[in-house]
Amino acid sequence: MSRRVRRRGSQSKDKDKVIISSPVFPETAEEYEICRPGGEISGCHEVEWTRLPDDTVVQLFSCLSYRDRACLSSTCRTWRLLGSSPCLWNSLDLRAHRCDADTASVLASRCTSLRRLRFRGSESAAAIINLHARDLREIAGDYCRDITDATLSVIAARHEALESLQIGPDPCEKISSDAIRHVAMCCSRLRRLRLSGVREIDGLAIGALARHCSRLEEIALIDCGSIDETALGKLECLKFLSIAGSRNLKWASAVTSWSKLPNLVGLDVSRTDVPSSALFRIFSSSKNLKVLCALNCLALEEEVNLNPLSSSHAKAKIVLTLFTDVSKRITSLFSNSVGNETEVTGNWRSQGNKDKHLNDIISWVEWILSQSLLRIAEMNPTGTDDFWLRQGAALLLSLVNSSQEDVQERAAAGLAAFVVIDDENATVDPARAEAVMKNGGIPLLLGLARSCREGVQSEAAKAIANLSVNAKVAKAVADEGGISILASLARSTNRLVAEEAAGGLWNLSVGEEHKTAIAEAGGVKALVDLIFKWPTGTDGVLERAAGALANLAADDQCSMEVAMAGGVHALVMLARSCRVEGVQEQAARALANLAAHGDSNSNNAAVGQEAGAVDALVQLTCSPNEGVRQEAAGALWNLSFDDRNREAIAAAGGVEALVTLANACANASHGLQERAAGALWGLSVSEANSVAIGREGGVAPLIALARSDAEDVHETAAGALWNLAFYPGNALRIIEEGGVPALVHLCSSSGSKMARFMAALALAYMFDGRMDEFALIGSSSEGTSKSVSFEGARKMALKHIEAFVLSFSDHQLFTMAAASSAPTALAQVLEVTRIQEAGHLRCSGAEIGRFVVMLRNSSSILRACAAFALVQFTIPGGRHAMHHASLLQKAGVTRALRGAAASASAPLEAKVFARIVLRNLEHHQLEASV
């Protein structure tokens, strides 16, 4: 796979996280001060540093990540004190890190003034009480699927000043109404409660919130199972209520109860089964309700033509659905303040937020829109294309401009998700991607990626990565300087940021025009460094880094950059030690591409000589994952072009492994079949390996692959059988295993000229007389039937070899060429008979010698076939034509060629081909003398 897309964010598995330890996140200056011989601290220039005012230093620190802030604090005692200033530690985002109890205890000294905390995962949720941040006002936890009642209750008990609690978006299925009651009793100052996926929320829990939390203004119960809708009517202070995606609601009682809430301003029923009649009743009966959001409500959409709510709305009261103009409806709330309907929230913010009531409404609208649009994008329901193209993309881009960080993140995540229509095959909807581009989304997302907030950086980078699957968007990203931005983010000390940036470089590197730009921006080194920075337990970043390096390694110049940056060692390390199949696949693909430039650089040899590389690739051919097996076989195929690598592969058990792989891939993908046969083709160049392949049972699976319906597989299987047939023992095995009919079928029917050519050569090797002695030995012990069978196979083979050669013959053209001494006549024949790909074939001296001998064979068909082969091997401009010409000159072929050209009994084609070979040799001789 050359590219990757992602809909969902990172999950909360411990193996996906990085532990924050003291060496990375310093706790005392003494641990990190680097002393010079004289005892002063390295880099500490007191005169210069003391000139900086304290508030300037604090402001500088506020622009840095936690790690960078802590590292700067370690340079001197003054900066250590300033780096611990309470104003720098009023907000903490631990989502990119594994936060266990020990880590939290280490951080506790800095968290006395902490007000806002974000974390990821259930382990972190259990650990945050060790921060001793009793004055926390806001807690937001992501991907806390395993959080329990006990954990949530303890969090509430230790943080009584809490005003906002948000746990989601993963379902909190282990949380019950008991935990919600504890939250209510402990956190009396609670203003906002947002929970996702709670199975049941009973009346007692909601009643406790009504009694103890007199300031509670907002509740969001997203994707919950059962909610006591009547009890919600007791929350008289409630201004904003969202039950998006929740099920099993009794809408009649809900309408009756909620319409009596005196302060209810906003209601979100998106992704529920709410009927239009219920919406109309609550909308008309609720005195203060201003915003009713009902995105992706199927029942409502089915009744759109009958629903008076969809076509009209009262002044200062709006209904938001997929089939209404959301921007226009929101604009109507602020008709006296804004003018441009396409930048609703941005225009409202630009007015200075003088009206706190309206500001609260727009902040809530932004949050519920970002939440619902992200969920709809992730589910990708049918029938939403028109919405996304008409207004959905523009809405997400508008939300990217929000002043709320979590809204920005969700909007960017929504942009990353809604363009993806097939995760597995990395398919992006071109119309949706281009809609983002046309609405100015690329510069907007790149600006977001430059943010100093790492959560925003990560989501923006993911959106850029997914959008860049589209070639037009990728060009726009590159033109706007996106490659440099992603290369910079790939160096981030935040794993989530680096992971998404590597994904962006992976997708951009698909385009040949972007590879050099990535290398020039330092992307190659950044990607290699990622592998060394996070070598274990971080399969997401490793797969993306290896995938990007694989794409870059396909370019000759970039492959050298990868090698110089230490990429060979890094990729071999992954192939040897990583157990994650996606990482293994991309590492093997990268090594295959690095080894593919054997004629232009030394990477092929470098990969083969790297300790453990060949052994690791041989082992990967036994992987249960087909993609891993395919890329490993491809790497071994490319490596086998080097003599030393070829023998190293055999020594590592490569022959046995590849024969086993070939036997097992009869029903596998064509890509795996091609590479398995190709690797055996590469190994079979040497006599020892060729004999070993025959002995290990490699003939039968290659014959089976020759019957494939894919032309690429035809070529590699025919090439391997051609090499094997050079040795009489293998040739006899091919006959005994039924290989002649398979080769005859290839020779006559394959759509690939190369496959037909090599099948004909394999048949010529088998019946040029060298195998006769083996055949006679076999027939003497088994009677005449085998002799008859051999003779029948020979006749069939010669018949189809002749037909193959004649398929390149034009009688009139050949007659003219035979009668004329003009070079143009031979040039015309050459143009008709040339097989372009045959110029890449390289024959040994023994093989060339065999064709020379074949020129004197008693069979005129084999003489014509030999001459035809020598034409292909010596055509000027062929990759190995000079090499073949030199071998022919050493073999003294001129006399044999002249005899063939002048022979009265030779076929017309053999005569003309012999003359063309003579002409080719003259050309190469003249070229060598210049």
Image (cartoon, rainbow, N blue to C red):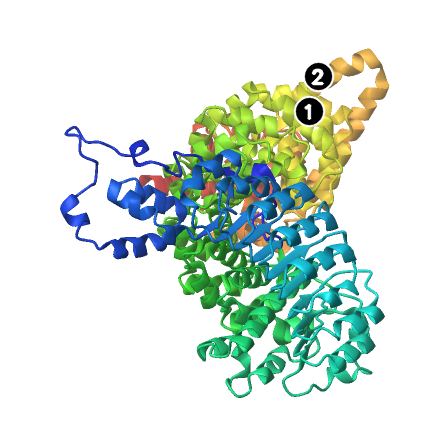
- Depth check, front residue: 376 or 385: 376
Q: Does the CB distance between marks 1 and 2 fall below 8 Å? A: yes
- Depth check, front residue: 498 or 901: 498
Q: Measuring from the top left, give residue 42's x and y in whole percent.
A: 21, 36
Residue picked out by circle 2: 774
Q: Which part of the image, by quadrant, shows the C terminus? A: top left
For label 1, count other residues whose C-alpha is less than 10 Å away and answer few (under 14), some (14-19) or many (20+).
many
Task: Examine the rendering and report whether any part of residue 869 can be seen.
Answer: no
Looking at the image, is 551 positioned above or below residue 850? below
Separation of marks 1 and 2 at Cα, in angstroms = 9 Å
384 displayed left or right of 522: right
Residue picked out by circle 1: 731
> Residue 623's mark?
none
Secondary structure type for disc 2: helix
Secondary structure type for disc 1: helix
**Residue at the farthest front position:** 211
Residue type, numbered disc 1: Ala
Q: Residue at x 58, y 53 (%)?
A: 832
**Residue 925 falls in which quadrant of the image?**
top left
407 displayed left or right of 656: left
Q: Earlier in the sequence, mark 1 or mark 2?
A: 1
For label 2, count other residues whose C-alpha is less than 10 Å away and answer few (under 14), some (14-19) or many (20+).
few
Q: Measuring from the top left, give residue 359's x and y in whole percent.
A: 53, 74
- Depth check, front residue: 921 or 518: 518
Q: Nearer the viewer, mark 1 or mark 2?
A: 1
**Residue 191 falls in which quadrant of the image?**
bottom right
Looking at the image, is 365 positioned above or below residue 377? below
309 displayed left or right of 125: right
Residue type, numbered disc 2: Phe
